[in-house]
Each structure stands twice: as C-alpha cells, then as structure tokens.
Amino acid sequence: MEKKISISQIKEVAQEAYNEVKGSTGGKNADYIPYLANIDSKLFGLSICLMNGQTINIGDTDYRFGIESVSKVHTAILILRQYGAQKVLDMIGADATGLPFNSIIAILLENDHPSTPLVNAGAISACSMVQPVGNSDKKWDAIVQNVTELCGSAPQLIDELYKSETATNFNNRSIAWLLKNYNRIYDDPDMALDLYTRQCSLGITAQQLGIAAGTIANNGVNPVTKQTVFEASLAPKITSMISTVGFYEHSGDWMYTAGIPAKSGVGGGVMAVLPGVMGVSAFAPPLDEAGNSVKAQSAIKFIMNKLGLGVFNGDNVTITE
Ligand SMILES: NC(=O)CC[C@H](N)C(=O)O
C-alpha cells in the first residue's frame, strides 16, 4: 500500500518517543569493560537521518560514546566492499547464532564457522580479512576511512576505552585463537584481535550513527555527503545480516515487535535501518541482559509502531515535506 508520512509527523513522534522513554530506569551499564561502567547512565540521544540528508536530533546526540559492536556493521560493509557478497558468505557466513555476542559454543555448533561478521567471532575474522592483509597500520586506516565515509565525518579513538578493553579481553583472545585453529583467521590472529578491539573503542555520536544507518537505508549513498560509499547491491546483504543477529539472542523478538533491522553495542548505541526511508540511531548506556540498550530499544520501537512503519509491512512509504 501507498503510505505518506510528513517530516513534521516524524519530528513529533521522535520527540514523543524521547519524552516517553527519557525517565525509564531499566537496565545497567556494561561493567565487564571498566571504562563503560563509569559513563553517565542518564545520557540519552535520538537521531534520525532521512534520505534527503535532513537529520532530526534530540537529546545527547553530540556525545561521543564507544561504538563497540555497532562497528561490526561498518567493518562487515568494508569486507563486502573489498571481497564481494559471495566471498564474505564463504569465508565467514551470514547465519544467526541465537547465542550471546561473545559465544564460543556458537563457533563449535556452527561447524567451525564464525556464523556472521556481526558477532565477536565473525567480527574478529572480518578484521583479519581487511585489506591490505599483513599491514596493521594500513588495515586500521581502511577501517577508519570506511567508518568516516559511512558517517560522513570521522570517529575518534577513545584511548582510555581501548586500553581498558585490551586489558580485559581474555574471552576474545580465546575466540581469535580458536578461529585460527579452524582456519577462519585470514591474517595474524593477534593483529586481527587488536584491530577489532580498537574499532570497538572508536568514539562516535548518535548523529554519526544515524547517518551511517541512513547510508545503508539509501543503498550505499550517504544522504548527507551524497558520496557513494558502497554498491547498492550490497545494501540488502548488510540489512539482512543486521536483522538476523543485530540484537543477538533477542533478534527475533526485536524484529517481531519493532520491525526494523537494528544493531546494538555495549556502549549503549543502536543503529537501525529502514530501507529507502530512514536511518535511526539511539544512545543510552543502560543495557538489558543481552547487551542491548534498554532506552534505545524502547525509543526506536515507539517510533516504528506509532508511525506504522516496518520492513514487513509491505508499504511503499513516501516522506513528504
Ligand atoms: N556487544 C558488544 O558491543 C561487545 C563489544 C565488546 N568490544 C566485546 O568484544 O565484548
């Protein structure tokens, strides 16, 4: 069906979502990474990027927080750009794990396969694939450049977070070496792990993440800078990956209730993609038990439900002035 929504309607509903959710007290900051435990848990930002490049920003949308696992989406896009869709499927996979993001059992259950670039195992494997293989500095430049193009502006490394995470990432070290054992690490394992840890420590704003989500929704063209960041044919590949595993073991419940593919990070950020319509991002540190921001989920769900939007609705949505 044809569905028309005005920009002022979107602004109104976004403000309503923000007001509704702002006072909620559910969840708690991630504390297995010491830096994250100390972030002000009252911070809350909501940002929407429309396909005409207009952004709607409410609350703490300029605060730089740790991107954490949302960076898995960016680097999955980078290897899709460098290798193409088939090779990424062959070398990592695109399956849901139904298990926590840092699961080791998931690697064993999937017959030695990392499953998807959007869980820790697949993301470390993805970092090992980033070209030029063998050159850590150049790989890092490629990762940052790709994030910059997707967001339309540069992220900034939060050094304290990087140190905090490096000092405590024992589980991820096991994952990297287990994958090496199964020939699923395509460069030096310690280098791949370090690049993964560093990309998780990039500081990003909700506005930047909203624009990155908008770039995916806009088939690879950044709606703000108008740059073609990746080929349009890759957009449904990345969106399908986000929808199957973006909220880990809660991904099914999320798609059922909110109807929008979204990816979370333990820094409190979420980026959500409604293809052809908008990118949405929300940031608030307190998390549920699967590591997904409680307020970000509530706000994005509120917007989708109130506007009657969702990838499964079958509507042809037009945004009017
Ligand atoms: N879900 C997440 O955001 C996890 C990212 C974090 N860097 C980790 O590896 O544990």
Image (tube, helix red, strand yellow):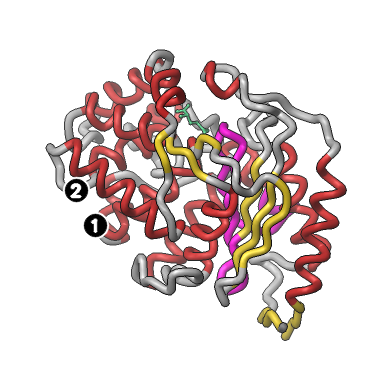
Dot 2: element: loop
> In the rendered structure, which segment of residues is drawn in magenta?
254-279
The residue identified by callout 2 is 131
Contact? badges 1 and 2 (CB < 8 Å):
yes
Image location (x, y in percent) of residue 163? 39, 20
Image location (x, y in percent) of residue 113? 34, 37
Q: Quick check: 92 above or below 276?
A: above
As drawn, the label of residue 82 is: 1
Q: Earlier in the sequence, mark 1 or mark 2?
A: 1
Image location (x, y in percent) of residue 135? 14, 38
Q: Residue at x 27, y 22 (%)?
A: 177
Q: Quick check: 314 above or below 286?
A: below
Image location (x, y in percent) of residue 19? 85, 49
Q: Quick check: 170 above or below 300?
A: above
Q: Residue at x 74, y 40 (%)?
A: 295
As drawn, the label of residue 127 is: none
Seen from the viewer's position, the closer of residues 123 and 155 is 155
Amino acid, disc 2:
Gln
Q: Assess whether residue 170 is covered by the magenta stretch.
A: no
Q: Residue at x 39, y 14 (%)?
A: 167
Seen from the viewer's position, the closer of residues 175 and 65 is 65
Evaluate whether residue 1 shows in this view: no
Describe residue 186's horizontal placement relative to residue 34 as left or right: left
Q: How many labels were placed on the picture? A: 2
Q: Quick check: 20 above or below 66?
A: below
Dot 1: element: helix
Q: Quadrant of residue 128?
A: top left
